[in-house]
Amino acid sequence: MDATGFRRLWDEITGIGLADTGGYLRFSWSAADLALRDWFDAQAAERGLLVETDRNGNRYAWWDLAPEAVVPPGAAPDRRAVLTGSHFDSVPHGGAYDGPLGIVSAFLAIDELRAAGAEPKRPIVIGAFTEEEGGRFGVPCLGTRLMTGVVDPDRARALTDPSGTTLADAMREAGADPDALGPDPERLANLSAFVELHVEQGRSLEAPVGVASAIWPHGRWRMTFTGAGDHAGTTRLPDRRDPMLTFAFAVLAARKEARLAGGLATVGRVEAVPNATNAIASQVTAWLDSRAPDEAVLSEILTGFESKVAERAKRDGTGFTIEPESETPIVEFDASLRDRLADLLGGVPVLPTGAGHDAGVLAAHVPTAMLFVRNPTGVSHALGEGASDEDCAAGVEALAAVLRDLAC
Ligand SMILES: [Zn+2]
């Protein structure tokens, strides 16, 4: 596999879902998603792989010596499949690589194995998971969370996109059956391993390819700051109870606590009431995202943050409450699989990530590993996300070596 070979296949999808901004709008069950699914089917057909869609809308292409044996309930351990792949969907105006790189690389890795005459002893399956980003319906890793029973199918069917369309309606419109949504334990039991190749989303990887150690624990909290709305011109400073001041302090405090503890904290979303230039706000709602290398550090950030903001609110005469919206524990990838991959690839770097992935969801059920491909800008979920064709080709080689080791 060389850089040109990678680019040739990659360019087949670079136009799909491309917006005027240069970013991608590839929301699940949208026209762009369906075009990507068609492309997936065509690639599978070209290679004689059997295409199948599970009850949750996740698509698979099977390289199986006996295609009729797709997901036989209770497959013998030596017939359990090796799953690879990633997701097609994007965040609004996201980059090209987050997700699709893992799917394109999987097709190319199968080409590599075949060119080398490899003969798998167990099925190799390419998966394309649905709604990984939560970019349309708000729940990340929805396809794998449904599969593993973490998300209730009734709740999933009722999720709405920003225009008010439910997931159930979006699926029906796309020709899929929302009534089938739900846990798929037999499918999980028939997997021997899952390996997701993904573009690295920070600047930590200095080699072309690396192996993931863990996904940091993370959480999202909703903060409410209350005060007294009033006139910006007639209210004396000592008379004010301005929640915007407490909010401003909170943004800085989050950053400081994260820096001191060795984690991350971000306030990226805020709503003010009444949101007027000449009025003191009566209420400010904002969201805190925090992540850390382990759960002790994460709770240290939160504890420090809450007590400092509460103290500040007292001085400002304002109210402050904070409620968790989601809390995700640390995911440690299978240690023996991780070490096996790192050794196999000649001692490539092993690094954690602060980003969530389907691999993090499936890791609780199947021995799971991730391969990262270097991202020179470190930017992700935005324009500027990228990887060189040479590094992507190295990623394909690494994935092929891993699949050969695990399945052949
Ligand atoms: Zn991703």
Image (tube, helix red, strand yellow):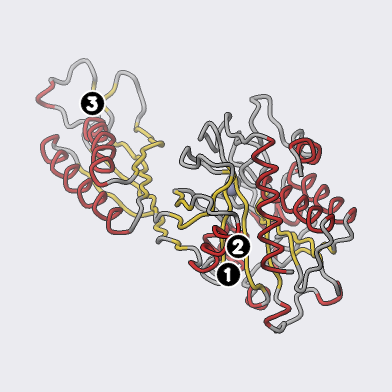
Asked whether, in this view, residue 118 is left or right of residue 272, the answer is right
Quadrant (top left, top right, bottom left, bottom right) of the N terminus: top right
Asked whether, in this view, residue 273 is left or right of residue 126, the answer is left
Q: In the rendered structure, which amino acid carries the disc numbered 1?
A: Thr
Asked whether, in this view, residue 289 is left or right of residue 383, the answer is left
Q: Which residue is mark 1?
A: 148
Q: Could you tell me residue 8's position as x and y percent?
A: 81, 37
Disc 1 or 3, which lies upstream in sequence? 1
Q: Nearer the viewer, residue 244 or 294?
A: 294
Q: Could you tell me residue 338's position as x and y percent?
A: 52, 62
Q: Is residue 31 visible?
A: yes
Numbered marks: total: 3
Quadrant (top left, top right, bottom left, bottom right) of the C terminus: bottom right
Instruction: State the residue at coordinates (60%, 36%).
Output: 94
Callout in the foreground (3, 2): 2
Q: Which mark is residue 144?
A: 2
Instruction: State the residue at coordinates (17%, 32%).
Output: 241
Instruction: State the residue at coordinates (48%, 53%).
Output: 350
Q: Could you tell me residue 355's position as x and y percent?
A: 48, 48
Image marks 2 and 1: residues in contact by CB distance under 8 Å: yes
In the picture as drawn, the residue positioned furthest to the front comes out as: 346
Mark 2–mark 1 Cα distance, whole angstroms, equals 6 Å
Q: Is residue 139 visible?
A: no
Callout in the foreground (1, 3): 1
Q: In the rendered structure, which amino acid carries the disc numbered 2?
A: Thr
Q: Which residue is mark 3?
A: 230
Mark 3 burial class by Cα count in 10 Å: few <14, some 14-19, many 20+ = some
Mark 2 burial class by Cα count in 10 Å: few <14, some 14-19, many 20+ = many
Q: Secondary structure at mark 3?
A: strand
Instruction: State the residue at coordinates (81%, 68%).
Output: 119
